[in-house]
Amino acid sequence: MKPIWIVDDDQSIRFVLEKALLREDLPTRSFTNPREVLQALEHDGGEGGPQVLVSDIRMPGGSGLDLLTKVKEKLPGLPVIIMTAFSDLDSAVSAFQGGAFEYLPKPFDLPKAVELIRRAVEESQREEVAEERMAAAPEMLGQAPAMQDVFRAIGRLSQSNVTVMITGESGSGKELVARALHKHSPRANGPFVAINTAAIPKDLLESELFGHERGAFTGAQTMRRGRFEQAEGGTLFLDEIGDMPFDLQTRLLRVLSDGHFYRVGGHNAVKANVRVIAATHQDLEQRVKEGVFREDLFHRLNVIRLRLPALRERREDVAMLTRHFLQQSARQLGVEPKRISDAALSRLMAFGFPGNVRQLENICHWLTVMAPAQVIEAKDLPPEVLDVPTLGAEPRPEAAGSAPAASPVPAAEAPLAQALPVLQQGSTEALGWEQGLEAEAQALLAAGRHDVWDALTRRFESKLILTALASTRGRRIEAAHKLGIGRNTITRKIQELGLE
């Protein structure tokens, strides 16, 4: 990971932040004035630049606000945190509200400062991943006839700012299509900001969308820009719009109608120059009939509708996508790409993929780690594929001494239960899970990764939570009880891990 750059003429501030961040395994690099930062950026050419920039406002040899403007010209996606005394805050807000990630008032609470910087790091890493996905989008979307309508629609909409509604099952790639629409639009040079409205608690969603003023509620120590302001001049992608609370639907309708909104606790209207793309896996017409989704908002969003086909509707894409994901997983792990036999590919193409493209990607990552040879055979496929009989196929025999096959998962639970591949304990066709973990760790370490702990911990926690939720039919409180964790903990983990 790139270092956190700290810019402050006060040595004690630099020292305290450096030590606190190093304790969190976050590398740092310190500067005493803006001029040194700009020289370092020129020398590095942006390649060895910062992950996050934390800068004071008032320093000898330059202003933090001027530095913000110049840095944003070179690295527009870089999160910048401005440190400021309370006396500077009011005058500073209007000057850098268009570019700063967040404000850190002095004197600051050190744990809160570290938490803020870590949040900025996560945002920066999400942007890096998003850029990689955007670059790979044409290859990942596929070439099946069922996708041609989507391609043509993206082409027809390339010079338009019209609102678009994307429908399709979970895991089918709705955000990927939204990014392609942004990439080929007149707003391509502006930001692309995505938010999953179902993943954020109702009482936080309003502030997340529209921002809040300082003092708007307990804990609101600074003014914060919402996603609408962050997407200024670009595109805002509202995923799972069907789950948006009814009262917030009214506020969203007003923004789409007149282009203005108010921050939480604010009295001055903020103009939004944003293109909205929405997505849902639900039947919004039915939601309207049930009275849980506003009909006027539905018609406002439903200007152009793009339906994304499920993977089972474009099985001819499975082979191309499988090879692509195997190559991608090999690059991520720093290993030789594996090949897949025709028999294994045929078995994959016959699978229903309730988790769609996302599930296929996870399966390919699993195979990169777990398949014993360079050529993947049908018997190497994960249990979730092998345990589903295909037309004319004999039931899969259990290996001697292995555990019996898992009981069938109810259809309503299948997408959740099969979102990640499952290693059956005792199976002789796969390594034990501890050996699999060891192999994965060795591959990541050999690749020179420095985030092995975080990467594997996230996957381990994801697996535990998804398995528990599958066993409780999605009931979070019961799942938390079975796992031995608190209700708030499982809710927070689901949000952090993107498991909604």
Image: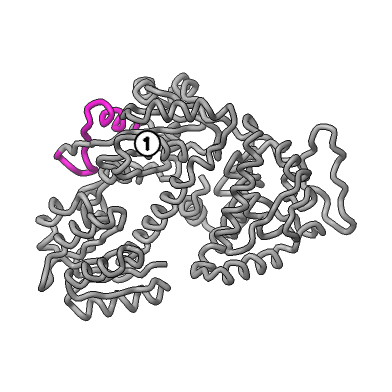
Whole-percent x, y for residue 298 in the image = 39, 23
Q: Quadrant of residue 267?
A: top left
Across the whole image, how many numbered discs are drawn on residues? 1
Q: Amino acid at mark 1?
A: His
- Does 16 sit left or right of 119 as displayed? left
Location of residue 293 with respect to 491 vertically, above or below: above
Q: Residue at x 41, y 40 (%)?
A: 179
Location of residue 4 with respect to 294 vertically, above or below: below
Q: Residue at x 34, y 75 (%)?
A: 20
Whole-percent x, y for residue 441 in the image = 61, 68
Residue located beneath label 1 in the image: 184
Question: Toward the viewer: 295 or 168?
Answer: 168
- Res 102 visible: yes
Instruction: Tell which residue pokes out farthest to the right in this image.
Output: 400
Disc 1 secondary structure class = loop
Q: Residues within 10 Å of mark 1 (few under 14, many from 20)?
A: some
- Res 468 visible: no
Q: Residue at x 58, y 67 (%)?
A: 444
Whole-percent x, y for residue 433 in the image = 70, 63
Q: Residue at x 38, y 76 (%)?
A: 22
- Does 93 sit left or right of 340 as displayed? left
Query: Is 259 covered by the magenta stretch?
Result: yes
Question: Toward the viewer: 395 or 178?
Answer: 178
Question: Toward the viewer: 72 or 395?
Answer: 72
Whole-percent x, y for residue 220 in the image = 25, 54
- Does 343 sit left or right of 238 as displayed? right
In magenta, the rendered stretch is 249-268
Q: How is the image coloured?
A: one colour
